[in-house]
Image: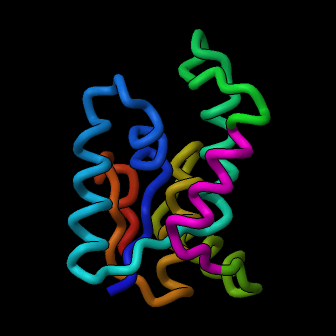
Amino acid sequence: MKILVDTNLLTRASQPDHPQHQDAMTAVTALTTRGHTLCLVPQNLYEFWVVCTRPTDENGLGMAVEDALARLSDLRQTFDLLDETPAFLPTWESLVVQHGVKGKSGHDARLVAAMKVHGLTTLLTFNKRDSSAIPA
């Protein structure tokens, strides 16, 4: 089964001192060992970049550009990267209108749109409530 990985899981996996680090690593290992394919979409990479390069006093990881670029390269080698297609925008627009999505939840709706377009039914995340209000 293909599973979309949420950016929050990627960031926790990149923070060895974070309390959720081991959970993130265990989940990735367990799912891949069971034969699941863990996937990303470009939005994951954009969001990951933002968190990695944002200063620590602004809830970021404070990485240098070179370090963030190396992490992106690692992600692209570790996970399957699914393409964005022309269907993303109308699917996202339909979801946000249908479910009255506002503000930052629009980012989560975009991941749900990606899931719909690619036929995925599972999102690996630490924050289920972000996308649970938007059925895939």
The segment highlighted magenta reads 68-82
Q: Give 92 or 18, whichever is nearer the viewer.
A: 18
- The location of residue 125, given as percent across then percent down, is 34, 54
Q: Quadrant of residue 73?
A: bottom right
Residue at point 60%, 68% (across, down):
41
Asked if residue 57 is positioned above or below residue 97 in the image, the reply reads: above
What secondary structure is the stretch in magenta mostly built from? helix
Residue 96 seen in the figure = no
Residue at point 65%, 59% (across, down):
43
- The location of residue 80, given as percent across then percent down, is 54, 75
Which image quarter is the N terminus in? bottom left
Q: Quadrant of residue 38?
A: bottom left
Q: In screen coordinates, is 115 left or right of 129?
A: right
Q: Quadrant of residue 90?
A: bottom right
Residue 7 seen in the figure = yes
Q: Give 56 or 105, whichever is nearer the viewer.
A: 56
Report if residue 69 lies within the magenta region: yes
